[in-house]
Amino acid sequence: MSENIKDKVVVITGASSGLGAETARHLAKAGARVVLGARRLDRLQALATELGLAKDAAFQVDVTDREQVKALVDHAVRLHGRIDVMINNAGLMPLAPLEMLRFDEWDQCIDVNIKGVLWGIAAALPHFKAQKSGQFINVSSVAGHTISAGGAIYSATKYSVRVISEALRKEVKPYGIRTTVLSPGAVDTELPGSVGAPGVNEAIADYYQHNAIPASSFARCVLFAMSQPEDVDINEILFRPTVQEL
Ligand SMILES: NC(=O)c1ccc[n+]([C@@H]2O[C@H](COP(=O)([O-])OP(=O)(O)OC[C@H]3O[C@@H](n4cnc5c(N)ncnc54)[C@H](OP(=O)(O)O)[C@@H]3O)[C@@H](O)[C@H]2O)c1
């Protein structure tokens, strides 16, 4: 599963923990040149050190800020001369019933999960067009395929990722760009920590503790999608823990 990965320049948002960090480990091992983005620079720098990368592989970015996401991608291109894969992974999951009116969480969830992905697309697309190659890997969720009580805002953002990705897929045909959506079920990361609503957070933490699978499950999907020959475009992967019903 490591064909077509060595030396590829891969920008990963949300690389400071969870799925993004684990994917960086797998990609670095397969010989990709990874550039790590997130807000917690100390975490990114520790990961860069762990992976034997230069310090400048870590780049502080808040994906809600369009200019910062552009700066991340431009940094990668300056370092490596190109960008081959943009993994729009940063996200949060503030599950809560609408009646709780947790407005700040609604704003943040929309800004990170939707606009963050849009800014990632906007930053990488001009480079991909110029190169006539590239791959977007946008992270949705099982919640981008199913809707639960308490999941209105999160599901809305994750359905949006699929909608945006499908339109993008059709639009970029002339440029040889590939577009992949990955939709995980419960995977063991720090994500339950983004559930702030009292009562809901304990339930989600408990669910994850008993059902979540390791982050390597996600990383292997990324490598699978990337490693296909350039004329094969893996558009959607939906996976769950075997025990997960939802
Ligand atoms: N784990 C699961 O069960 C699961 C299931 C379905 C989908 N997903 C999706 O997978 C993606 C990764 O989540 P995870 O499970 O790996 O959770 P995680 O361990 O909490 O990681 C989330 C990452 O997003 C980053 N992030 C959050 N807000 C950001 C911002 N404003 N700017 C830049 N980075 C930001 C965090 O970094 P900083 O805090 O350092 O900025 C962190 O690196 C998310 O899109 C999530 O919705 C996860």
Image (spheres, grey):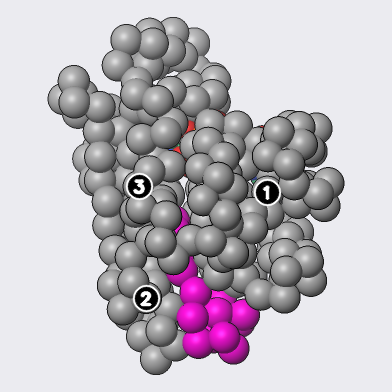
Question: Can residue 160 be spotted in the picture?
Answer: no
Residue drawn at x 25%, y 45% as measured from the top left: 238
Q: Earlier in the sequence, mark 3 or mark 1?
A: 1
Nearer to us in this view, 99 or 139 = 139
Report the front residue among 148 and 132. 132
Q: Quadrant of residue 183?
A: top left
Q: Residues within 10 Å of mark 1 (few under 14, many from 20)?
A: many
- What distance separates the C-alpha of mark 1 from that of mark 2? 24 Å
Q: Quadrant of the C terminus?
A: top left
The spot of residue 230 in percent (x, y) is: 37, 75
Q: CA distance from mark 2 to mark 3?
A: 16 Å
Q: Residue at x 51, y 43 (%)?
A: 26
Q: Is residue 29 left or right of residue 218?
A: right
- Ligand 1 lies under 8 Å from the Cβ of mark 3: no
Q: Which residue is mark 3?
A: 221
Tell me the quarter of the picture where residue 178 sits. Answer: bottom left
Q: Residue 116: horizontal and vertical position, in percent?
A: 58, 55
- According to the image, label 2 marks what residue? 230
Q: Is residue 170 visible?
A: yes
Disc 3 secondary structure class: helix
- Which contiguous range is marked in magenta? 125-138
Please tell me whether mark 1 or mark 2 is closer to you in this view. Answer: 2
Whichever of callouts 2 and 3 sits on the residue coming sooner in the sequence is 3
Dividing the image into four equal quarters, which quarter contains ligand 1? top right
Kind of residue at disc 1: Leu
Q: Position of residue 87 (x, y in %)?
A: 52, 56
In this rendering, is residue 78 above or below 243?
Answer: below
Residue 36: which disc? 1
Tell whether 213 sits left or right of 139.
left
